[in-house]
Image (tube, rainbow, N blue to C red):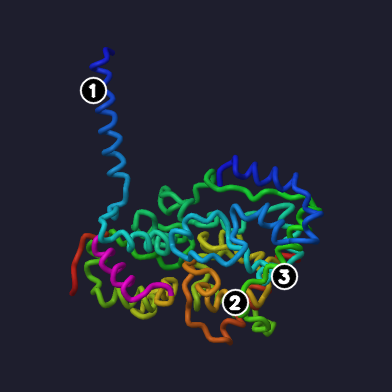
């Protein structure tokens, strides 16, 4: 391989790797407006909802009720914003859902809950308010 | 933790004159040996970023948290308390279906000699944390029927979503509870369940609204679990 081909090959490899990295990132990757919500999600929510936000978190294998798949546009689109906010703050029981989703109102501020609700819409690419 | 850091800590632990320092200035001893991974004084920075960066649990209230006998034993033969490491998020990756623990990314706590473990435990027990952090005397030590305790832990409060009570029984993002009763003082267990955010600001365990009666049941259940383990 001559040096020109070698450079082209390197470029292509670089572009290929960069594309791969882009696609490997969860659909949720960093819009600045969601930066804090994404950090909160990564810290508190991924343990059950998964690093890919698909409900397959580390703990999900041991749970009798599977965590919500936040990447599911249909399932998430059917849930009104008010219910999303209620469930984050007060837990699954607030919407007659599983006790395994705990109340995070003692950890997040109201502002952070709103940011998380907006972030979930970003993740599922679905609905606004209903 | 990087292997070289572990090695440095291990080497310093085994070479520092622990016995000489232990009687005089336990805080200095711990500062030398443990402070690179653990907070020995209450951190001013309680941000989320700090939580992501810390290498081990805070120890500034270790004397109000741990049972000394357990500490001496564990420091000589450390076992995995948190199945997914101190901060699960840094040690999980997508698996075939569920996320899994990235085992090679986990590090092992340095192993101490009996003498060093005793000196370290003595020093740690002097770190009791700020007044009121733990509710001393809160636990009433009322026995709970195991099936009732299991129901509270699993079904009514959902603790099992994150905590194992036995291998394969319960989630992996929190510390295992099978040996928690041997490891932890009951008042600490009670206080932590009541308000984990007061003790460990920002931690990925929610503060739930739990009555004193239920806190007593859950604490008793956890303490009894450990007693069951001891009989095995």
Q: Earlier in the sequence, mark 3 or mark 2?
A: 2
Magenta-tinted stretch? A107-122
- Can see residue B203? yes
> Is-magenta flag for residue A115?
yes
Instruction: Look at 76% across and 55% down and name the residue there.
Output: B117
Judging by the rendered image, the residue that carries numbered circle 2 is: B133
User: As displayed, is residue B123 above or below residue B113?
Assistant: below
Which residue carries the number 1 mark?
A: A8
The secondary structure type at the circle numbered 2 is: loop
B228 vs B197, left or right, is: right
Q: Is residue B142 visible?
A: no
Numbered badge on residue A30 = none
Of residues B41 and B69, the one nearer the viewer is B41
Label 2 is found on which chain of the structure? B
The span from disc 1 to disc 2 (Cα, nearest Å) is 62 Å
Question: Where is B166 relative to B114, above or below?
Answer: below
Residue occupying the far top of the picture: A2
């Amino acid at each position: 391989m001559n040096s020109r081909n070698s450079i082209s090959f390197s470029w292509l490899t670089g572009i290929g790797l960069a594309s791969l990295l882009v696609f490997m990132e969860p659909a949720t990757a960093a819009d600045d407006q969601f930066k804090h919500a994404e950090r909160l999600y990564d810290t508190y929510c991924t343990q059950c909802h998964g690093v890919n936000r698909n409900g397959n978190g580390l703990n999900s294998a041991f749970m009798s009720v599977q965590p919500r798949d936040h990447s599911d546009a249909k399932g998430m689109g059917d849930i009104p914003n008010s219910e999303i906010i209620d469930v984050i703050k007060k837990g699954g029981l607030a919407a007659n859902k599983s006790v395994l989703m705990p109340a995070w109102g003692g950890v997040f501020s109201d502002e952070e809950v709103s940011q998380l609700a907006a972030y979930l819409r970003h993740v599922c690419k679905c609905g606004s308010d209903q | 933790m990087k292997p070289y850091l572990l090695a440095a800590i291990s080497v310093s632990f085994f070479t520092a004159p622990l016995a000489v320092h232990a009687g005089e200035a336990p805080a200095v001893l711990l500062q030398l040996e443990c402070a690179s991974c653990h907070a020995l004084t209450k951190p001013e920075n309680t941000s989320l970023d700090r939580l992501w960066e810390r290498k081990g649990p805070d120890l500034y209230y270790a004397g109000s948290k741990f049972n000394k006998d357990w500490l001496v034993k564990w420091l000589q033969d450390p076992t995995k308390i948190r199945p997914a490491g101190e901060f699960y998020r840094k040690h999980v990756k997508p698996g075939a279906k569920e996320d899994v623990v990235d085992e090679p990314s986990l590090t092992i706590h340095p192993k101490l000699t009996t003498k060093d473990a005793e000196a370290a435990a003595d020093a740690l027990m002097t770190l009791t944390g700020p007044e009121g952090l733990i509710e001393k005397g809160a636990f009433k030590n009322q026995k709970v029927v195991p099936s009732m305790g299991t129901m509270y832990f699993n079904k009514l409060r959902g603790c099992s979503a994150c905590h194992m009570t036995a291998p394969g029984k319960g989630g992996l993002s929190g510390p295992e509870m099978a040996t928690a009763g041997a490891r932890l003082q009951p008042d600490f267990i009670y206080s932590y369940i009541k308000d984990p955010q007061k003790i460990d600001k920002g931690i990925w365990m929610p503060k739930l609204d739990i009555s004193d009666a239920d806190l007593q049941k859950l604490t008793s259940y956890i303490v009894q679990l450990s007693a069951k383990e001891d009989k095995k």
